[in-house]
Every structure is written in structure tokens, then in C-alpha cells.
Amino acid sequence: DAGVIQSPRHEVTEMGQEVTLRCKPISGHNSLFWYRQTMMRGLELLIYFNNNVPIDDSGMPEDRFSAKMPNASFSTLKIQPSEPRDSAVYFCASSSQAGGRGEQYFGPGTRLTVT
Amino acid sequence: GEDVEQSLFLSVREGDSSVINCTYTDSSSTYLYWYKQEPGAGLQLLTYIFSNMDMKQDQRLTVLLNKKDKHLSLRIADTQTGDSAIYFCAESGQGGKLIFGQGTELSVKP
């Protein structure tokens, strides 16, 4: 398996623009997680899905952030409009909750810079 | 609530042992995990321990779990420069999510 795939790997955009980050989880995994990592706040869980349904979005910073999972093999995290303080590395992770250990497998991340 | 605490930095000399410590709050966690993050990469599962165990050894890695004190440690024997990374402790939380610590940055000096 190719592991969790994220795109793009790097994104540089201007303040006010819409940003869409994409994630393809590991095939067969039924849980998907979006994290944000910054020097100041460390690793933060933004939202997670079980079987394509959002379970907990309490970590989403504000209404400018939205996430969708239209099917088991694809998820997006959208920021509209983007602001400089959104600059961070965004990770997607997936796991299997079907009687397993529940460990999460992380993608390589998308480094977002908002100028 | 669920919370995981780690010290932020650890510096050791090559060849020495490293011990990274972690405390957690949720006594119902089934598994506890150690993840490693190298520069510019995502987190990678290093090892895990089931909550009814008190020790697990995997080559140079030894995980110790003290359930009474809710204390988890990761010992790396014969630490190499390639072990320099950020190490995250995590406990299993509600609904399948993991609760991560802040990460310990391990620096290995030659």
C-alpha cells in the first residue's frame, strides 16, 4: 500500500485566497483525522471522521475551516478565506477501528504558507 | 479530561541510552503509543504497549508502563545520531482518536 497520500506537499498562497488540502487514506481504513502542527501550539487535532461521518470537529479553529469526506477514499480540508496565522503543516492520518490497535498512520503533510 | 505531558527537550551523547518520559491521565486507555517524527516528515509509529503489560522490548527500544502512576517511558539503547527526532507519546482516547503529548525533541551529539 502507498500509505496515506496528501496533496499538495507545499502550498504558498496570499491572504484571502481559498486553500484546499487533499487526503487519500489507506485503503480499508475507516477513520480519518486532520491535524495541524505549528511551533507555537504543537500538534492539534482539527476534525476526525468514522465511516465518512464527521465525529468531532471541536478542534476546527473557526468557520473559515471546513472538511468533507465524500467517500471512503478521499477527504478535503478547506480554508476560506486564508489568513497568515493559518500557516502550518497540515497532516492527514487514517486508522482501522475494526478490532485493531487503533494506531494512526500519518501522511507526509502539506506545508501551507499564507503571505 | 484526557491529557498527555512530556518534557520538551532531551540531549544525549552518541552511544548513551536515552529515556523519554510521559505521563497521561486516562486510566481507561487500552493502548499507549510512541511515535517518531523526523524533520520534514509525518509521524511514524515506533512502538506501542497494551495497557495490561508493564514492559515491552523491541531491539534497541524498551517501553515501560507504570499504570498506577500513569507513567510511560521509552528507552533507546546505544543512541545514534539517526535517532535525533521528535518523539510523541499518545494514549487512545474516546471514539478512536489519539491524545498526543507535545513531543520531546531528542538531540544526539556525536
Image: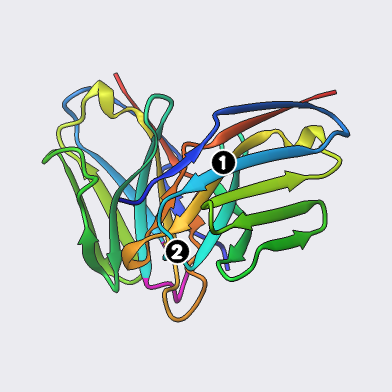
Position of A77 relative to B55 (above/below)? above
Q: Which residue is mark 1?
A: B41
User: Identity of the amino acid at label 2?
Assistant: Ser
Residue drawn 71% across and 39% down? B19
Quadrant of the image occupied by residue A94: bottom left
Q: Which residues are magenta?
A: A25-30
Quadrant occupied by the N terminus of chain A? bottom right
Q: Relative to B87, is A81 on the left or the right? A: left
Q: Is residue B61 magenta?
A: no
Q: As shown in the figure, which amino acid type bears the numbered disc 1?
A: Ala
Which residue is under mark 2? B29
Q: Position of residue B104 (x, y in %)?
A: 58, 34
Mark earlier in primary sequence (1, 2): 2
Callout 1 crowding tier (Cα within 10 Å): few <14, some 14–19, many ≥20: some
Image location (x, y in percent) of residue A28: 45, 76
The percent position of residue B109, horizontal first and vertical second, equals 80, 23
SS label for mark 1: loop
Disc 2 secondary structure class? loop
Q: Looking at the image, which residue sits at the far front?
A: B68
Q: Residue furthest left?
A: A63
Pointer 2 chain: B
Residue at position x 79%, y 32% from top? Answer: B81
* Vertical relation: A70 (above or below) A90: below
User: Is A60 left or right of B10, judged from the image as shown?
Assistant: left
Q: Quadrant of the C terminus of chain A?
A: top left
The nearer-to-camera label among 1 and 2 is 2
Residue B77 visible in the picture: yes
Q: Please give the name of the residue rendered at 88% of the width and 34% of the height, measured from the top-left corner.
A: B15
Most extreme residue toward the bottom is: A99
